[in-house]
Amino acid sequence: MTGLSLHAPSDTERLGALLAQHLPEGRLVAWLDGDLGAGKTTAARALLRALGVAGGVRSPTYTLVERYDTAAGEVAHLDLYRIADPEELHYLALDELVERARLWLVEWPQRGQGVLPPPDLVLQLQVDGTGRLARLVSHSAAGRAWAEAVHRAWVTVA
């Protein structure tokens, strides 16, 4: 699928909102991949806001996991930047998250490989001049449907 040009932070927020609006049924795992400053947390915050989270949406950089109750179900937002070894994730009670969370949003997923559940969708973000470039890469049928719906909505409005 072609990349989506994100010219301003508001475009990244729009992408996050579209991900929420087109969230398929069932339990899903989305990996948010990109360098520092690529817009992972901005996209996650926008998705959470679009799912109805009011008040502060904190980055889980220090807490590692933030959990949110939404109309769509529980969302777990993980930021694994500070994880040195995937085995450290066993102390985060991920078993409970697997049982409860409807959606996982995982920043820096490569730091948890082998322990994290596989992604349905990977949102790849990269700096592109003064903007960003986003790619939606599906790894399951649900992820493919999600990516296609978001891409259609992006192109329709753009």
Image (spheres, rainbow, N blue to C red):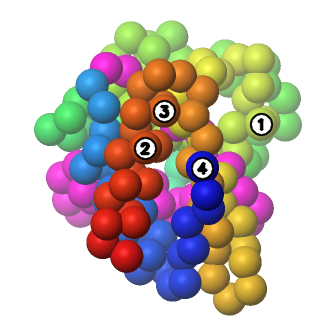
Q: Is mark 1 on a helix, strand or loop?
A: helix
Of labels 4 and 1, the one closer to you? 4
Mark closer to the chain start, 4 or 1? 4
Location of residue 44 in the rendering, given as x and y in whole percent from the top left corner: 45, 55
Q: Residue 140 carries which label?
A: none
Tag of residue 148: 2
Q: Disc 3 or 4, which lies upstream in sequence?
A: 4
User: What residue is shown at x 72% (from left), y 74% (from top)?
Assistant: 127
Contact? badges 4 and 2 (CB < 8 Å) = yes
User: As shown in the figure, which amino acid type bears the numbered disc 2?
Assistant: Glu
The region drawn magenta spans 26-55
Give the Cα separation between the discs numbered 1 and 2: 24 Å
Q: Quadrant of the C terminus?
A: bottom left
Say which element carries label 3.
helix
Sequence-first disc among 1 and 2 = 1
Q: Is residue 101 visible?
A: no
Mark 4 lies on a secondary structure that is loop
User: What residue is shown at x 53% (from left), y 22% (from top)?
Assistant: 140
Q: Are marks 3 and 1 in contact (CB under 8 Å)?
A: no
Residue type at numbered disc 1 = Gln
In the picture of the structure, the residue carrying the numbered disc 4 is 1
Mark 1 and mark 2 residues within 8 Å of each other at the beta carbon: no
CA distance for labels 3 and 4: 10 Å
How many angstroms separate mark 3 from mark 1 (CA)? 21 Å
| Residue position for label 1 | 110
Judge whether residue 120 can be spotted in this image. Answer: yes
Cβ–Cβ below 8 Å for labels 2 and 3? yes
CA gap, disc 4 and disc 1? 22 Å
Residue 29, relative to residue 49: is it above or below?
A: above
Q: Mark 3 points at which residue?
A: 144
